[in-house]
Amino acid sequence: MTTLHIGAGGAVFTKRRRNNARERLLKLLSDQNWHDHLQLREVAGTRYSARLLELRRLGWSVEDRNLDGSGKAYRLTSLQASRRMKPKRVKLFLSEAQVLELLATEKVSTGVRSELERALESYQLNRDKL
């Protein structure tokens, strides 16, 4: 979460609070025991699930399990983060014509081409439902 500090020089925005919440959450989970969602919320705030996603993207392995209809519990499965970080995905909105134009060129990598083809196929199959 972005916090606002107003000082003599004006407003300054920082993202320190989110990092602290993530660090507090990692510290809680570092015992590798199960912790219910209420404990996570108490330590990392109401957006604890966003902090869990950040940890996972940073390579931490977090396991979850259902608690008989009363939410979930989470635990860290390793005390070391994987060296392979999960990349953050970006949404991109293009018209069908723009996608076809990109696919007609050789300026896109194989991975991007594959994603464009997959998205185009999905769009064409579902365009009547949109």
Image: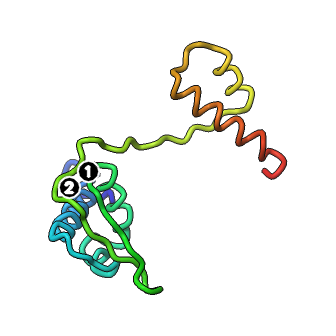
What residue appears at the point 19 percent right and 71 percent down from the top-left corner?
A: 28
Q: How is the image coloured?
A: rainbow
**Residue 91 location (% of width, % of height):** 54, 42
Place residue 71 in its image quadrant: bottom left
The residue at which mark 2 appears reads as: 7
Work out whether 113 lies above or below 73. Answer: above
Q: Name the disc covering residue 12, or none.
A: 1
Label 1 Cα neighbours within 10 Å, binned few <14 / some 14-19 / many ≥20: few
Specify the amino acid type for callout 2: Gly
Work out whether 109 lies above or below 3. Answer: above
**C-alpha span from label 2 to label 1:** 8 Å
Q: Name the disc covering residue 72, or none.
A: none
Q: Is residue 125 left or right of residue 28?
A: right
Specify the amino acid type for callout 1: Val
What residue appears at the point 21 percent right and 51 percent down from the top-left corner?
A: 81
User: On the rendered image, what quadrant is the N terminus found in?
Assistant: bottom left
Q: Is residue 53 left or right of residue 26?
A: right
**Residue 20 location (% of width, % of height):** 20, 61
Q: Nearer the viewer, mark 2 or mark 1?
A: 1
